[in-house]
Amino acid sequence: MPRRIATADTADAQLGEAAQINLTWLVYLRWAAVLGQALTILYTAIALTIELPFTALFAVLGVEVLSNVWLTHWHRRHPGTEAEVTDQVERVQVLVMFGDTLLLTTLLFLTGGVANPFSAFFFVHVVMAAVLLRQRWSYGGTAFACLCLLVLHFWHVPLPILENNPELRLQGMLIALSFAAVITVVFVARVTRALDLRNTQLATERDRKARTERVQALGTLAAGAAHELASPLSTIAIVAKELEKRLMGEDAPEDDVADARLLRDEVARCRRILHRMNLEAGDQVGEELVPLSVAQLLENTIQEVPGASRVDVAVGPAASEVELFVPAEGLAQALRAVVSNALDASGTGQRVQVGAHLDGDQLLIWVLDQGEGMDAELAERALDPFFTTKEPGRGMGLGLFLTRSVVERLGGELRIQSKRGEGTTVTAHMPLARLVRPV
């Protein structure tokens, strides 16, 4: 059931976004139409010296201007994508487009009816209705435009110069059809491009939410495992400690005492791993934010990594002056997974480079290994959960996935650059605005 609700909410959001984009472009197109109509009227009167009912024509243009001012103001007051707002946007679009068809009919009625070449702009209205409105309203808009054309055929104020000058009518028709074609193509292309871009953004957001849900599921699993294992591990720790004391009191061989001590140390290590697993699986979401420098963050990152002596750290001058305000353990653990992967990939004796520098308003933290590298397909899949190139038993394939989740929660992006034979660079791009203490 929750999945159905989420899907319905996503669909409503997509409809809302589409309605808002359509309304935005409708406002732009109406301003362009008013300007074009005004210039056409002035050109006809001045260049062609055709007498027109200027008062009535500019009164119609005034109605268009006032209605678009109202539409712009209304759009700014209703920017949301909720279902109720979306329904209101659709009703407003229907009202405006039918009103525009009626206003165009009025202009043509005053200037020769269907004999006016600019009657071709009815085609623009039909296309707009098909793009912006639902099916039933687009059919209704088309039928209304055809009805208006039929009325104009029988009832209009004639312009003798158009009826008696076929050459002028032909020139006007060529100009009107050209304008109508250009406006239609530009409008449809812009609206389609805007909708495609928004759909891409929505798809990306859906993927991010899905990853977050998987991380939360892992967090629940980790918390359950930690809870179930805490009691037996505590029991083993107590027994191991008592066993060590007894062996020491009985003058047992040193090897037996060392084994008991090792058992107790390994139990403590298991408990630390469980605690860290909680952090890896998402508990850092609620971690307290603390101030620390970039250098401190990188030091915390590598201090518990096996093989830390093979890691070289470099912090750029500008980055070294930045004080971060972040979930220190969670972010360090996320970066630690990348460093561990780099050490595993580099092999014995090879060094790993870890660094940070500022790039504009972003902090870049990168890890460079000396491994064999990956091809483009593997690099793309490396961020997927449970994908690993390691041998069985050496990893679950969650390190980069969880690192990516942490970085994205901080508003950033995790990128991988790799080529066969040239090693791999993993870079966290994070906006400084999300990493520093709010002013």
Image: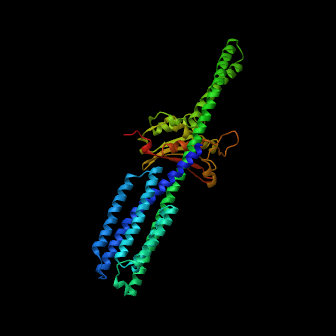
Residue 307 percent coordinates (x, y): 60, 37
Quadrant housing the C terminus: top left
Residue visible at 42% across and 78% down in the picture: 153
Q: Residue at x 39, y 87 (%)?
A: 167
Is residue 237 at least partly visible in the picture? Answer: yes
Considering the image in quadrants, where does the N terminus appear?
top right
- Residue for point 61% across, 34% down: 222
- Residue 269 visible within the image: no
- Residue 379's x, y, as percent? 61, 51
Name the quadrant containing residue 394: top right
Q: Nearer the viewer, residue 153 or 17?
A: 153
In this view of the protein, which residue sits in the foreground, 126 or 425?
126
* Residue 285 versus residue 35 in the image, above or below: above
In the rendered structure, the answer to whether residue 428 lies left or right of residue 321 reads: right
Instruction: Give 418 or 19, whichever is nearer the viewer.
Output: 19
Q: Is residue 122 left or right of residue 42?
A: right
